[in-house]
Structures are given as structure tokens and as C-alpha cells.
Image (cartoon, helix red, strand yellow):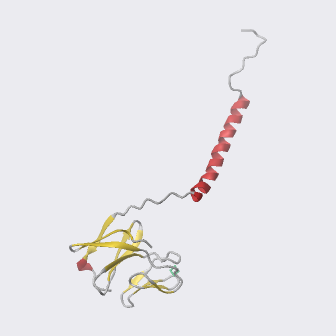
Amino acid sequence: MDPGVKQTSAVTRRDFLIMALSLAGVFSAAGLLAPIVRYAFPRAKAEVAARVRVGSTSQVKPLAESLDFEYQETPCSLLQLEDGTYVGLSRVCTHLGCIITWEPDNTRFFCPCHAGVFSPTGEVLAGPPPSPLPTLKVILEGEDIWVEGWNPA
Ligand code: FES
């Protein structure tokens, strides 16, 4: 090897630093842009209509106590109406998301946060809630009561 010729590596320290900083910039930009892209192009939520057994017909009486349960991580209630049919609905208030409670003595759902009132079928009767409660598809099989998916709004 000629002592006057300085040996250089294929990638200089300067080139390496430029590449490393460029990569860091690209990852930072991607991290900042990802939420914006996700917001602009939301993925359709996969609607999985899981079937869940709520209880038995012997557990409910018309407009009496509700059967409370969770469906897809949403607090829900099941009621039997006066005509003997069943309604399953979300207990999450459509105003600001407080949990409503069934009041059998007043035959209504009541939201304690801002005095929202819903009918046994989830219609808004009073207060600030802007829309009815989402309802579930209720299926009867013998004495078993099941819910399977949300009804379209
Ligand atoms: S959160 Fe229910 S009425 Fe406001």
C-alpha cells in the first residue's frame, strides 16, 4: 500500500450522519402524518354481530326491572315492553355519554348528568340528548333471550 494514499471507507462519517438524520426526519414526518391520514381516510369499522345471551324470559316482566348487560363493551339494558316484546338498548346517553338508568316506577330511562329522559324504547322524551338510544336486535329462542348486532340508526 502506498503511504501517500489515504484509505477511505465506502461510507464516510459525514455520509452516515446525513443518512441517519434523513431517516430520523422521515420517521418523524411519518409519525406526524399518520394521524392526519387516518383521520382523512377512516377505515370502515368491521361490524361483528356477535350473538350474546342476555338472560331468560323468566327474569323479566313488562316494564319492571331491566336486565343490564354489556354488549361489545357498551353498557346495555333489556326490557320487556307492555305488549310482551323485548327491547335491548344502549345505556350510554346520546348527549355526553353518561350511563343512564332504568326507573321502573317512572317507566323511563333517566340520565343523571343533565336530566335527559328516554322512553322504554329509547326515544328522547326530555332534556338535551340529541338522538334516541341505539337499539339491539333481540332474538328469542325458547326461554333464552339473545342480542345480535345493533339496529341501523
Ligand atoms: S349526558 Fe345525558 S343528558 Fe347530558
Q: How many numbered marks appear? A: 0
Q: Residue at 69% across / 31% down in the picture?
A: 16
State the image coordinates of residue 66 (x, y, percent, origin top left): 34, 80
Q: Is residue 8 above or below residue 113?
A: above
Which of the image's four quarters has the C terminus? Answer: bottom left
Which quadrant of the structure image shows residue 50? bottom left
Q: Is residue 5 left or right of residue 26?
A: right
Residue extending farthest to the left is 142
Which of the image's four quarters has the N terminus? Answer: top right
State the image coordinates of residue 14 (x, y, percent, origin top left): 73, 31
Q: Which of 76/45 is in front?
A: 45
Residue extending farthest to the front is 152
Residue extending farthest to the right is 4
Which quadrant of the structure image shows residue 10? top right
Q: Residue at 65% across / 47% down in the picture?
A: 28
Q: Residue at 39% across / 90% down in the picture?
A: 106
Q: Which of 124/59 is in front?
A: 124
State the image coordinates of residue 49 (x, y, percent, origin top left): 36, 63
Q: Residue at 43% across / 59% down in the picture?
A: 46
Residue extending farthest to the bottom is 106
State the image coordinates of residue 3 (x, y, percent, origin top left): 76, 10
